[in-house]
Each structure stands twice: as structure tokens, then as C-alpha cells.
């Protein structure tokens, strides 16, 4: 049954946002056909920020958006909460896409590495860019703040209490990748995280997702995953350059990072939250030093 005048809260965990993209996100939310409560939670580990936002939210419906994710149009909120009219549905997923104009802003080598972003991606277990009911998030005990695999852990728990559907909505996922070496380091962390996830949860999370992770981490076979996502029709002429500066580095990172995570596990605090925890520690130490000087 359609909900009249739905109350929707949008939670955005924020840490070192890119000003232009973050501004676009907030502007897009203000233009939605359904008015929303915007809750920003700054400078915490992601799970902590999300949980604080959920507890503060006044809306019946919760949409969680990453700071670099911009809704495609003004009907995003209206469309993503619509499947929740069915009481059996507990989560609604978005599709991810990078607009070509944003991709072209990246340095050449970064563009070669991220050509797969130019095709629509349909993640099965993202925590962000999705919609929920607040009562369902409370029912499963919020987000686990003691694991770096928050997407996987959350997805397993939410699927146990109801159906998960796609909302047929697109979010522009605008990762701020402008430094090639830094981007490679980031992707290594992602691959390592995939290995940790496979070791910890196996196929409990999502059987297809588990198989995809194994394929990506298998020597030579992993190239199939890379070129399945390649926008061949428009960029066939860049295949040789992409192979050298995109496919080979990505494949090596997928293989080395995944199996490193699989066999060695996670580091204390979770690699996902390492930067924010380090910065918070530095800030705390600086405040303590100031107090001593006084």
C-alpha cells in the first residue's frame, strides 16, 4: 500500500569529502520530489557514523548514501523507497555508474585503470546507496562496529528478515581517484578486504558474489572479469594501452591482495577505518598536548 507523505531520513557518513562532489550530493537531495531529512555524521569510522545517524533519524525510511554518491535525478528517493511499500521487502538496492564527463577529469593512467566504472554496476551487498525501514535496522541491532566487513555482515543479517530488491535507480559513484599510485593502494585494500570476506563468510553472504571474488583472484582467469566490465563498443581502440596500464596492474592487485587477505586476515581496527582512526588519534594527542601546555 502506498505511503502518503513518507518521512525519509538520508544518512551520510562523512570523512574528508571532495567539496564539489559532496556539494552536488546535497544539492541533489534538496531537489527530490520527496523532501528528506539530511543527517551528516563527520569523522567517525563508517559504521559508527551510520549508527549515530540511524538513532538520530526521525524518518520511517532510511536511505544511506556515501559522500561520493550523487543520485541520478530528482525521483531517486521516490523510486528507491517504493518497493518498501511491500512489507516483505526490507532493503532496496541501487545501481552504480560513473558519468563519462567525471571519468574524463581523471589522469590518463587512472582512466585506464577505471574503465569498468563506465558501465552500470549492480552490487548485491552494498550497505550504502540503499533504502531501509528504520525499525528493521533497529531489529537487526544496527551496524556491527567491530568488523571491517560491514557490508557483508549487514547484508547477511538483513536478508534473514526479509526480501532484498533492486530499486532500478542509478547513483553516480564519483570516487576521487586523481593519483595513480594512491589509487593502486586503495584497490589493493579493496582486494585484501575481498579475501578477508571470503575467508570469514565464505558463500554465506551471496553465492554469486563469492564466485566472482574467486574468479577475480585466480591467475589469468581474472582477466575475464576485467574485460567483462570493459566498455568495448566505445573504447575498443584503447585496449592495448588499457591492457598495460589497467588490466595487468588490476589483475596483479586482485590476485595478490585477495590471497593476502584470505591467508593473513585483517589488521587491528579494520583497514576500512584505518585513516579515520589514525586522524582521530592525532587529534586527541594534539588536544592533550594543548591541555598540558596550559
Image (cartoon, rainbow, N blue to C red):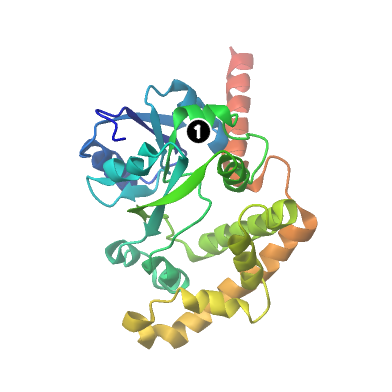
Residue 83: quadrant of the picture = top left
Q: Residue at x 53, y 77 (%)?
A: 247
Residue 285: x and y in percent read 63, 26
Q: Is residue 166 left or right of residue 185?
A: left
Q: Is residue 180 visible?
A: yes
Instruction: Give the camera-side residue of 248 and 173.
Output: 173
Q: Is residue 242 left or right of residue 208?
A: left
* Other residues around mark 1 within 10 Å, as few (<14) / some (14–19) / many (≥20): many
- Above or below, 225 against 259 in this view is below
Instruction: Give the camera-side residue of 124 and 237.
Output: 124
Residue 288: quadrant of the picture = top right
Residue 291: x and y in percent read 60, 15
Q: Residue at x 29, y 29 (%)?
A: 6
Location of mark 1 (residue): 50
Residue 238: quadrant of the picture = bottom left
Q: Is residue 45 visible?
A: no
Q: Residue at x 46, y 44 (%)?
A: 128
- Above or below, 241 against 199 in this view is below
Q: Quadrant of the C terminus?
A: top right
Q: Is residue 75 left or right of residue 188?
A: left
Residue 191: x and y in percent read 62, 61
Q: Secondary structure at mark 1?
A: helix
- Above or below, 111 against 5 in this view is below
Amino acid at each position: 500500500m502506498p505511503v502518503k507523505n513518507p518521512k525519509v531520513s538520508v544518512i551520510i557518513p562523512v570523512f574528508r569529502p571532495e567539496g564539489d562532489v559532496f556539494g552536488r550530493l546535497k544539492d541533489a537531495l534538496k531537489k527530490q520530489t520527496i523532501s528528506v531529512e539530511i543527517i551528516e555524521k563527520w569523522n567517525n569510522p563508517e559504521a559508527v557514523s551510520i549508527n549515530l545517524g540511524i538513532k538520530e533519524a526521525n524518518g520511517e525510511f532510511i536511505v544511506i548514501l556515501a559522500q561520493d554518491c550523487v543520485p541520478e535525478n530528482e525521483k531517486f528517493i521516490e523510486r528507491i523507497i517504493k518497493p518498501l511499500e511491500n512489507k516483505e521487502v526490507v532493503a532496496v538496492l541501487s545501481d552504480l555508474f560513473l558519468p563519462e564527463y567525471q571519468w574524463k577529469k581523471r589522469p590518463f593512467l587512472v582512466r585506464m585503470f577505471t574503465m569498468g566504472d563506465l558501465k552500470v554496476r549492480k552490487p548485491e551487498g552494498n550497505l550504502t546507496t540503499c533504502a531501509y525501514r528504520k525499525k528493521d535496522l533497529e531489529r537487526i541491532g544496527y551496524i556491527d562496529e567491530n568488523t571491517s566487513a560491514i557490508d557483508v555482515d549487514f547484508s547477511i543479517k538483513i536478508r534473514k528478515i526479509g526480501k532484498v530488491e533492486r530499486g532500478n535507480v542509478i547513483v553516480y559513484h564519483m570516487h576521487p581517484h586523481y593519483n595513480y599510485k594512491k589509487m593502486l593502494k586503495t584497490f589493493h585494500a579493496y582486494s585484501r578486504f575481498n579475501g578477508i570476506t571470503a575467508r570469514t563468510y565464505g558463500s554465506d553472504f551471496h553465492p554469486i558474489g563469492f564466485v566472482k571474488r574467486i574468479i577475480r583472484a585466480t591467475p589469468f582467469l581474472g582477466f575475464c572479469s576485467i574485460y567483462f566490465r570493459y566498455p568495448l563498443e566505445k573504447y575498443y581502440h584503447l585496449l592495448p594501452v588499457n591492457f598495460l596500464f589497467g588490466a595487468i596492474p588490476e589483475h596483479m592487485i586482485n590476485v595478490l591482495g585477495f590471497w593476502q587477505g584470505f591467508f593473513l586476515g585483517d589488521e587491528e581496527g579494520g583497514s576500512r577505518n584505518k585513516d579515520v582512526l589514525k586522524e582521530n588519534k592525532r587529534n586527541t594527542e594534539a588536544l592533550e598536548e594543548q591541555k598540558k601546555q596550559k
